[in-house]
Image: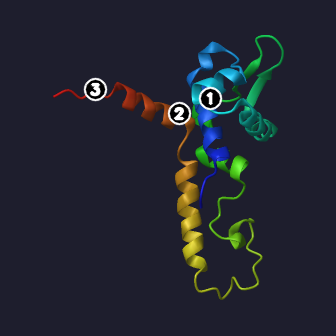
Amino acid sequence: MKISTKGRYAIKMLIDLAEHKDEGFIALKDIAKRQNISKKYLEQIVSLLNRAGMFNINRGYQGGYKLARSADNYSIGEILRLTEGSLAPVSCLEQDENMCEKCSYCPTLFIWEGLNEVTTQYLNGITLQDILNHKQDIDNFDYVI
């Protein structure tokens, strides 16, 4: 599995919104500037995330975006599935029910099921708030000899 820039930038965008939540609605141009991402590319990402109700939007002057939920209610797995589609390591695991005609005797299926389970649990277990907390720990790290 390889996460595209779309998935990575979506996470960066949502982290930015979480970091600036007290500032009200945030303009896309401000996020683009802070994150060094093209505004046009962010518009494509916004389109995907907005369909899933990830934002509250205010149009017009002083318009922008803010998170619809608290940062601890956004999992990285959810964000990546919206931007990347399925995160399954093989195509036969992309649907809820494995429709592969060979699944009952596939000698490697257990490998892919295990990988899918571990990956899903890991990514679903990390929230935007976890990233904010980690970032704060890094920013507060002051090592002096």
Residue depicted at 54% across the width and 69% down the height? 114
Residue depicted at 72% across the width and 34% down the height? 42
Helix, strand or loop at disc 3?
Answer: loop
Q: Mark 1 sits on what residue?
A: 70
Which circle's residue, 3 or 2, is located before the other in the chain?
Answer: 2
Residue depicted at 61% across the width and 79% down the height? 109
Give the image location of residue 32, x and y in percent: 65, 27
Q: Mark 2 sits on what residue?
A: 129
Q: Tell me how far mark 3 sits from mark 1, CA to CA.
A: 29 Å
Label 3 sits on what residue type? Asp
Relative to residue 131, is residue 64 depicted above or below?
above
Residue depicted at 60% across the width and 15% down the height? 22
Quadrant (top left/top right/bottom left/bottom right) for the N terminus: bottom right
Q: Depth check: 51 or 125 in front?
A: 51
Q: Mark 3 sits on what residue?
A: 142
Q: Label 1 neighbourhood size at 10 Å, few (<14), some (14-19), many (20+)? A: few
Label 2 sits on what residue type? Gln
Verify CB contact (< 8 Å) between mark 2 and mark 1: yes
